[in-house]
Amino acid sequence: MRRLFGVVAPRYDFITRVFSYGMDRSWKRRAVEMAGLAERATVLDLACGTGDFSKLVHARRPQAITIACDLTEEMLRLARQGGARDPVCGDAACLPFQDNSLDAVFVGYGLRNFPELAASIGELHRVLRPGGRLITLDFFLPENHFWRRLFLIYLYEQGAIWGWLLHREPRIYTYIPDSLQSFVTVPEFSRALASAKFHHVTALPFVLGGIAIHCATK
């Protein structure tokens, strides 16, 4: 997975816009609004990609401390070029942060790629301060099975087309539907957060449950 993201990094923002129907930036702005950040909040942008959440948080709360973290060095290089300060290479299953040290954690399109989802959620709970918030934006399996099938077909077709056009490799962007095959629905993820002792879990679904923002409080 690290090698894959190293290859797609230069095209990551473009592909994210394509697969989110051009709505990615507005969804991320909505997610930052839902976080209710204090002026000097300490915020982790996990699976940061090129650092979109870091930029949006800084634009809304200039005095906040934002930490961009990703497993892929090429993504971190691009995040640094985009203005992220001192980005950190880290794994969601073993974050390099102390207990109760963060006011908020944002995860954009990273959940599906965490090998152990429950363990990673527990790790996110660990690093948040009491009252801190976890905000995620990701693809999910639609509950309606007919729409689920169409949604996955669409993602596979789009992935194959853009993979061929950008890299001459049709399979390179089908990692999105591939990762969805073993993922969860929006309500199932809400229940997973509640099981990890998060409270006030709110889900805001889009595309008939194919994409959603979750906000939860420790």
Image: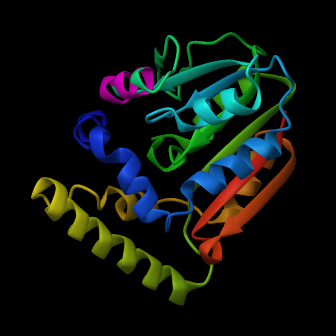
Instruction: Residue 17 in the image: state x and y as whole percent.
Output: 45, 58
* Front residue (pair 216, 41): 41
Instruction: Residue 27 in the image: state x and y as whole percent.
Output: 65, 55
* Front residue (pair 212, 81): 81
* Residue at x 60% of width, y 29% of height: 54
* Residue at x 56% of width, y 13% of height: 96
* Residue at x 55% of width, y 56% of height: 24
Which residues make up the magenta segment?
73-80
- Image quadrant where one finds the C terminus: top right
* Front residue (pair 161, 29): 29
Instruction: Residue 42 in the image: state x and y as whole percent.
Output: 74, 18
Rendered image quadrant of residue 76? top left
* Front residue (pair 12, 202): 12
Instruction: Residue 108 in the image: state x and y as whole percent.
Output: 56, 44
Vertical relation: 43 (above or below) 190: above
Vertical relation: 144 (above or below) 7: below
